[in-house]
Amino acid sequence: MTSINTEKSTATILIVDDEPYILDMLREQLANFGYNIITACSGTEALQKAEEFKRIDILLTDIMMPYMNGIELAKNFNKLLPETKIFFMSGYTFPSLNIHELPKENHSVFEKPFSIDRLNCEFSKVLTN
């Protein structure tokens, strides 16, 4: 069983969102904290990245995406890289989302817009546990 990387400066985060400007903004801001950032604009591309990189410490995915939503992505991703911590984000309000479909464990949900500092704080917590 592989362990989660405890050094933030070498932690790898895969960000998945179908909105290019959100990917660019998150890539830039999280890279400033010292993370290695990979991006994907779809669930299919994210699964390809999982196979390519073999170790990803954190998956940060939008919930509402075409073709494969973030919940479906997380379920498939977990089969490939079960040690990866999963964080969801959504611009939709939570009563309108079917959050009962979310995995029972190993995830957090951030409602857009969210503070990048809060996100970094949560990432730091899971990387040091």
Image: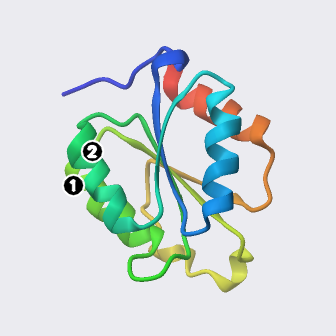
Q: Is residue 47 left or right of residue 85?
A: left
User: Which colouring convention does the figure follow?
Assistant: rainbow
Q: How many numbered discs, if any?
A: 2
In percent of width and height, residue 75 lies at 32, 63
Q: Quadrant of residue 116?
A: top right
**In-front residue for pair 87/17:** 17
Above or below, comparing residue 128 to residue 21 in the picture:
above
Q: Residues within 10 Å of mark 2 (few under 14, many from 20)?
A: some
Label 1 close to label 2 by CB (< 8 Å) = yes
Which residue lies at the image location 44% right of the left edge and 60% below the top edge?
Answer: 104
Residue at x 27%, y 38% (from the top left corner): 53
- Label 1, label 2: how many angstroms apart (C-alpha)? 6 Å
Q: Residues within 10 Å of mark 1 (few under 14, many from 20)?
A: few
Residue 78's place in the image compared with 69, above or below, is above
Q: Is residue 15 above or below residue 58?
A: below
Q: Quadrant of residue 110?
A: bottom right
Query: Which residue is at 36% across, 57% downward?
Result: 46
Left/right of residue 40 with respect to residue 8 in the rendered view:
left
Residue 88 percent location from the top left of the image:
56, 58
Q: Which mark is residue 27?
A: none
In the depicted structure, whether residue 27 falls above or below residue 93: above
Task: Say which residue label 2 marks.
Answer: 82
Residue at 21 percent of width and 47 percent of height: 51
Q: Quadrant of the N terminus?
A: top left
Looking at the picture, which amino acid does disc 1 mark? Lys
Hey, what amino acid is under mark 2? Answer: Pro
Task: Name the residue beneath numbered marker 1.
Answer: 79
Q: Position of residue 7 (x, y in %)?
A: 49, 14
Secondary structure at badge 2 equals loop
Mark 1 secondary-structure assignment: helix
